[in-house]
Amino acid sequence: MGNQSKNQFHGIPADERTNLYRKCINEKTAIQQKKITESLLELMQIKPFSEITVTQLCQHAGVSRRMFYYLFSNMTGALYALIDSKIWAVEICGINEILEFFMYWKTQKVLLDILGNNAMSGLLLERMVTRILQEDYDVHNWLKSHGWKDNSRDLIVFGFTGIMGLVYSWHYSGYERKPEEMAALVENLIAPYFA
């Protein structure tokens, strides 16, 4: 990040990073957004994020710059949309068990590699914490229904970032352990917090 403030990401202050892209409300814009985020993932396999321009991304995605700027404030907005789509997929797919969580993130090897290669692994954690803290995220009720003793947001954030830390460690080890072993490890670590 060079000489940027630690509260900035690609020159964008922390308090301005929440509205960098539109949530699509119709099928047409959702398709265009998906084209752009998938193209960004493909381009980031070839070169660093910092070297990808809006023009290159639009050409690769087959969308206009006008559509890009309708959907995103800037390139960071497209990156956030890409990461958030992977986080939301956990919810959409109904992944609510630890084993399924590990199996899902193993399928996201390319994304984890790209974020690591671009020194952006922390961005996934930041976006996940942001999602957990949103009021419409139902993690509190899910944990309560599974017997979680302490429903404080701080403990929930600590738990999720710890689990994602294990996902990263597992990823960087080349998935040496089976998903079942990783799930068992987490279940043993969090067992004291459940009734």
Image: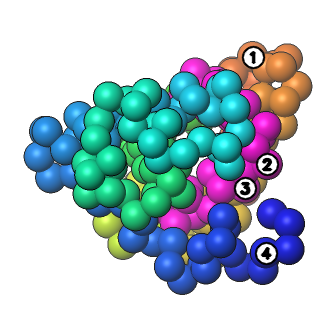
* Residue toward you, 161 or 51: 51
Compute the Cα span from label 2 to label 4.
14 Å
What's the amino acid at mark 4?
A: Gln
The residue tagged 4 is 4
Seen at 45% across and 42% down, the residue is 55
The residue tagged 3 is 122
Establish if 181 lies above or below 188. above
The residue tagged 1 is 178
Q: Main SS type for the magenta part?
A: helix
Q: Report the span colored magenta.
A: 102-131
Q: Position of residue 134 (x, y in %)?
A: 41, 70
Q: Nearer the viewer, mark 4 or mark 1?
A: 4
- Going from N to C along the chain, the mark reached first, 4 or 3, is 4
Q: Nearer the viewer, mark 2 or mark 1?
A: 2
- Going from N to C along the chain, the mark reached first, 2 or 1, is 2
Please tell me how crowded label 4 is: few (under 14), some (14-19), or many (20+) other residues with Cα within 10 Å.
few
Left or right? Give the position of 75 relative to 2.
left
Left or right? Give the position of 69 relative to 140.
left
| Residue 23 in view of the camera | no
Compute the Cα span from label 2 to label 1.
26 Å
What's the amino acid at mark 2?
A: Ala
The residue tagged 2 is 119
